[in-house]
Amino acid sequence: SKVIMVVANLTPVKGIEYLIDAFSLISDEEKSLYLVIVGDDDNDYAQKLKNIVREKNNSDRILFLGKRHDISCLLKLAYIFVLPTLDKYRKEGSPVALLEAMASGVPSLASDVPGSRDILSNHPDQLFLPEDISALRAKLNWLLKLDRKKRKQLIQDQLEIIRDNYSIEREVIEHEIVYSKCLNL
């Protein structure tokens, strides 16, 4: 089985319904594919999503895990991570879930919105237009069919992004710069 995963605060800006639609289109072709949705599912938007899944008769392959504290363990199960944020309302700042997935070695896709775009700026092939089900479907199919060598290279590229831009050492240096400027050192 292959697991597509999203970890997000389940609010309308996250665009999870577009991921559900794209998944539903490819799951007919890929019988061993599952979509796992992680996030607080005790709200109106989550109920709307669950109703969409029931209407599509996909409840056996689209799983809502609710709010979890074992994200690092769950990411080990993921074959693909997707963050389908909309390009309206409040957008992404620096999406930690995307960074965690990339740092965990999970090939990741994100909608082309600020924040996600900043992280994947050198890898536009991992971005898709927000709300574009066809584009998301194409990106999912691309990652599902990626050969082992190219998949391994994509993972290495993601790890390099994390190492070069989001390591704890880098964060310490950036904080020191800010403090030095504030203290006029």
Image (cartoon, rainbow, N blue to C red):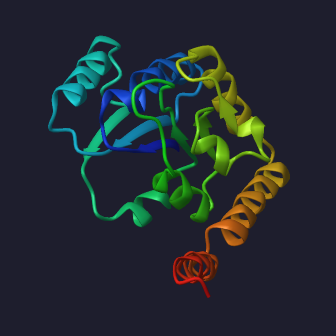
Residue in view at x 43 percent, y 65 percent: 72
Residue 62 in the image: state x and y as whole percent.
37, 32
Q: Residue furthest top?
A: 55
Residue in view at x 29 percent, y 24 percent: 49
Left or right of residue 68: residue 104: right
Residue in view at x 32 percent, y 43 percent: 9
Residue 88 in the image: state x and y as whole percent.
45, 23
Q: Residue furthest front?
A: 184
Q: Is 75 above or below relative to 147?
A: below
Q: Residue furthest bottom?
A: 185
Q: Is 85 above or below relative to 95?
A: above
Q: Which quadrant would residue 106 be assigned to in this image?
A: bottom right
Instruction: Report the front residue among 6 and 183.
Output: 183
Residue 180 in the image: state x and y as whole percent.
58, 83
| Whether residue 163 is visible | yes
Q: Which quadrant would residue 48 be assigned to in this image?
A: top left
Residue in view at x 76 percent, y 62 percent: 156
| Whether residue 1 is visible | no
Left or right of residue 176: residue 46: left
Q: Is 35 above or below relative to 15?
A: below
Instruction: Report the front residue among 36 and 39.
Output: 39
Left or right of residue 92: residue 157: right
